[in-house]
Amino acid sequence: MKTLNLGYLFISAIYFIAFLLGPQLLYSQKYFVTYGPLALLLITIYFGRDELKLFNWSLLKERLFLRWVYKGFQYMVFTQAIGTLILGPFTHSQAEQTTALYSIAILHMIISGPVVEEVVFRKVLYNKFKNISNELTGTVVSSMFYAVIHDNMERFPIYFITGCILCSVYKKSNTIATTILIHILINAVALIANFIRQKGFFY
């Protein structure tokens, strides 16, 4: 059984404490929006520095790696599309709305968010509960937390399913690099879709 990086546990604790402070504090304060995600990203990189040194960067060019990224991204887009058909047009989470107020939030949503969240929900929560119980428990618990943390209860089922998809890809690809890249891509698509809606290009 692998021992979890204590630094990652520390990051997870900070992440959840920040959530408990409330979205109004986190997303309406300029300094929190500007420096909070950046600080978490830098702390995550610091505690993961040994893994980064050992990471095989050529993996990113391998066909199997790219296939898992493509499949995961495909399933995520499909889930979002079906969810929109069933639940109606999506409402934006507090984090997505913040990108309209602070340009730096766009960078955080594409880079800081995916990296930190994949460490917290896949690396820490999924692995922790998988080790305590089994893979199904790890997937369900981490995906439930992942859905709740996005603070958009109307879209809870979609976030839960996408969390399950990310857990599955993480398990099968055996690297968090796949889920980080998928997360980056899906957030980028969400931002582009939001921009198109705001500009009314198709209305």
Image: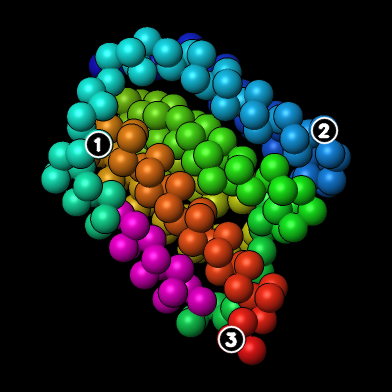
Check residue 31 in the rendering and tell me which mark sits there, or answer none.
Answer: 2
Q: Which residue does the image show at 73% across and 29% down from the upper left? A: 35
Magenta region, main secondary structure: helix
Circle 1/circle 2 CB separation < 8 Å: no
Q: Position of residue 16 (x, y in %)?
A: 64, 32
What's the distance in space between the residues labelled 2 and 3, CA to CA?
35 Å
**Residue identified by numbered label 3:** 202
Q: Is residue 100 above or below residue 9?
A: below
Which is more N-terminal, label 3 or label 2? Answer: 2
Q: Is residue 35 above or below residue 99?
A: above
What's the distance in space between the residues labelled 1 and 2, CA to CA?
34 Å
Q: Which residue does the image show at 28% across and 49% down from the upper left? A: 69
Check residue 171 in the rendering and tell me which mark sits there, or answer none.
Answer: none
Give the side of residue 159 with respect to residue 4, left or right: right
**Residue identified by numbered label 1:** 60
What's the distance in space between the residues labelled 1 and 3, CA to CA?
36 Å
Q: Quadrant of the N terminus?
A: top left
Q: Position of residue 56 (x, y in %)?
A: 23, 23
Q: Is residue 119 above or below residue 77?
A: above
Which residues make up the magenta segment? Answer: 72-84
Which is more N-terminal, label 2 or label 1? Answer: 2
The residue nearer to you, when weighing 79 against 66, is 66
Q: Which residue does the image show at 59% across and 86% down from the upper left? A: 202
Q: Residues within 10 Å of mark 2 (few under 14, many from 20)?
A: few
The residue nearer to you, when weighing 129 against 155, is 155
